[in-house]
Image (cartoon, rainbow, N blue to C red):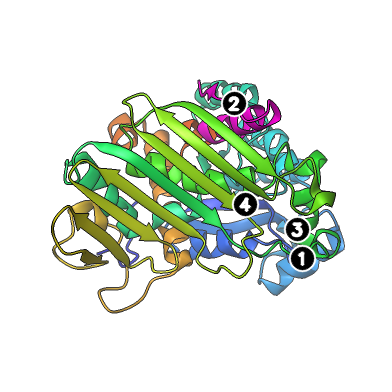
Amino acid sequence: MFIGEKKIARPFRWGIVGGGRTSGVGYKHRLGAMRDNTSFVLKAAAFDLDFARCVDFGKNLNMDEERLYPDYKTMFAEEAKREDGIEAVDIATPNFQHFEVCKAALEAGLHVICEKPLFFKVEEGEEIKKLAEEKGKIVCVTYGFSGFDLLSQMRSMVLNGDIGEVTMVDLRYAHGFACDPTGDKQAEGQKWRVDPAKSGPSFVLGDLSTHTFYMSELICPQLKLKQLLCDRQSFIKSRAPLEDNAYVLMRYENGAVGRMWASAVNAGDMSSQHIRIVGTKASLEWNDMHPDELYYEVQGQPRQTLVRAMDYLNPEALEYERLGALHYTGLIESWSNLYTRFAIAMDAKNRGDEETLKNLVYPDLEHGIDGIRWVTKCVESADKGGVWVDFK
């Protein structure tokens, strides 16, 4: 059980770009990072392109007004002059800014935590990978759902062979919160997501499915995607060429198959992410509306419900368990677990501790590049009329 005691010598001084008052994700980043004040302490921010709004928001968070900045370039330059300047930065901006801010942060000698999808092009990911290696810095990706304890239990059970050889992977992230097109023009967090210049070549494939695709990589690290076929739709016609619904079929190198349904127009559904991993002996099923329960179904036996925080779980599922059994967790526990791992990764990198980095499970730059490749290949397949394309 983890109760917030420090896992590194001291917390990282941390800044954030974007994530201001109108952001849909900024509060999650701040809560995740600062739930344990042993990992990160927020020192500086460029919350908003409107500087007056940035200052007002920062003051309402009890931040030092002198460390609220009009843009990320100014923040990086001014913080570099301080003995107590920031050591890591969070990028919580719309997609089109991720690459330039990430590159500038690494050049300023900062570790980076970035929203997903990481960038628009795989080549941009490879450029950042080279730069991060040169600078000796860590780049993390906020696949925010992936810190739930029972996902670690699933990973452990898959690797232990408890379900046999994986044959099928069934993924879904499909909600209905974009059924009303008026939000495309009125909601700050929605407007940029349906603008190709800011969101990139996709809507739900980048915004939703990258989460669940990474979670499948987390649970089944032995599976390597070989090919995929994507069919995407714009049911709200004004969103074209961006999709608000997509279906993806997958083929893995070991012969396993999979499918993904991503949608923002699944009217009325509040149960967004479902993951089912089918093996030759048994299956595992989890969904984020009931994150404290994992179904384990052995062929010919009654369904078993595994509950978070119980002693019968594997050690990997208990390491970051925070609340104890009977006390329900939520999304912020997942984000907090991720940020704790991010801090451990950054600290290990600073100390040259490659053994810790090798064994630490978190969404790193390689997974971010896989997410870029996933979106790119899905769009390629769909735009070619729904054909199979090679993943690598």
Q: Which residues are magenta?
A: 370-392
The residue identified by callout 2 is 387
The residue identified by callout 3 is 190
Q: Is residue 389 magenta?
A: yes
Of discs 3 and 4, which sits in the foreground? 3
Q: Residues within 10 Å of mark 3 (few under 14, many from 20)?
A: some
Which quarter of the picture shows residue 317?
Answer: bottom left
In the rendered view, does 34 fall on the left or right side of 148? right
Q: Residues within 10 Å of mark 4 (few under 14, many from 20)?
A: many
The residue identified by callout 4 is 15
Marks 1/3: CA distance? 11 Å
Amino acid on which disc 2 is placed:
Val
Q: Nearer the viewer, residue 260 or 354?
A: 260
Amino acid on which disc 1 is placed:
Asp
Of discs 2 and 3, which sits in the foreground? 2
Q: Residue furthest bottom?
A: 326
Of discs 1 and 2, which sits in the foreground? 2
Which quarter of the picture shows residue 321?
Answer: bottom left
